Image (cartoon, rainbow, N blue to C red):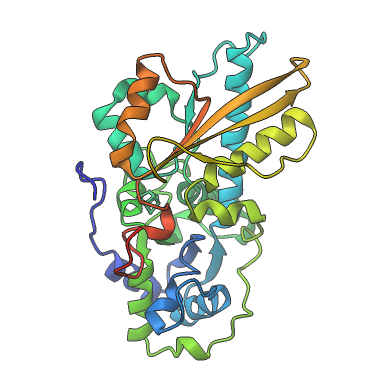
Amino acid sequence: NCPFGAITDISMVEKVKKALADPQKFVVVQTAPAVRVALGEEFGLEPGTNVKGKMFASLRKLGFDKVYDTEFTADLTIMEEGTELIHRIFAHAGVPGYEKEGPLPQFTSCCPAWIKYAEDKYPKILPHLSSAKSPQQMFGAVAKTYAAEKLGINPADMFVVSVMPCTAKKFECQREEMIASGFQDVDAVITTRELAQMIKEAGIDFRSLSNEEQADRLIGTSTGAATIFGVTGGVMEAALRTAYEILSGQSLGVVEFKAVRGRKPVREATVNIPVKELGKTVPLNVCIVTGLSHVDGVVEDVLAGRSKYHFIEVMNCPGGCINGGGQPIRRDTY
Ligand code: SF4
């Protein structure tokens, strides 16, 4: 699916097993929103069955010291991207003090395949990308700093594992920039399919596990906005809700997307935001692109100065992370 090698499906399972067997290592795991509704398929459950509790239970049985939920750092990404969007809107409107903010439109930055594609094919678009890290990488940095301190663990002894729907996340965690904690923030990534295989190999009866188990609390609390990261449009909508609430002091209603340029891969909407600081209502044009083969026209419009958008979400996988390369393999077409 990726012409630039962003998706390298190397296995890190043995690395994870080695860390779990090492008494010196404190092994923590994070689980992405899209994993919990797909993992059950590997155990004969209906597609879409939410097995969140069973997933947490099986991870504890596999020996992870702390089991966390990526949704917490998905919320952090939303706050960062939403705030950054506000600053860029202010810069665009000429509000003093925001001159150094990046240009509009702002693109989302949480899909590593899209980032690699932009770096390789459209380097001039990079100032338009949000500076926020993906939830996976924010989690790694928070785990090896805040969580390590609270737990009294030397971050050098902490080993952070991600369970992701995505093969490109393996590439992302190894990028040389991803060392905010002073260490490699995320040490290993396994996919939904690989976690299922580990559970089967360990002889865990997944179906009979309780579905009531919860994530550990320290970095496990989250909002419903984080959950919608797993589907296309979710990141943009969540960040937009944050920006709307901060700018207007009100909650955003339903965002109605209209299909443009054919069927579903590119969609757009206009959200009118009453901005207190500007004393007027600003129409914000947003766009979501699902599938990298549909992004070229959108990017070229921005580079040519003819784009009407202010905020654009791009996801490599058709339908978003729920259809990521590490998910159970199905024959359905999108
Ligand atoms: Fe990974 Fe696909 Fe989600 Fe991008 S859209 S983060 S490649 S699963």
Q: Is residue 148 visible?
A: no
Instruction: Judge whether 156 appears above or below 307 on screen.
Output: below
Is residue 200 toward the left or the right of residue 252 in the image? left
Location of residue 262 in the rendering, given as x and y in whole percent from the top left corner? 37, 40
The number of numbered badges drawn on the structure is 0
Is residue 217 toward the left or the right of residue 320 in the image? right
Location of residue 180 in the rendering, given as x and y in whole percent from the top left corner? 46, 40
Quarter of the picture holding the C terminus: bottom left
Location of residue 73 in the rendering, given as x and y in whole percent from the top left corner? 57, 50
Instruction: Judge whether 184 appears above or below 283 on screen.
Output: below
Tell me what residue is drawn at x 48 percent, y 66 percent: 26
Instruction: Judge whether 219 appears above or below 309 on screen.
Output: below
Q: Is residue 286 visible?
A: yes
Location of residue 307 in the rendering, given as x and y in whole percent from the top left corner? 44, 20
State which quadrant residue 72 falls in: bottom right
Tell me what residue is drawn at x 30 percent, y 24 percent: 123
Q: Nearer the viewer, residue 223 or 72?
A: 223
Residue sticking out furthest to the front: 262
Tell me what residue is drawn at x 32 percent, y 23 percent: 300
Q: Nearer the viewer, residue 120 or 272?
A: 272
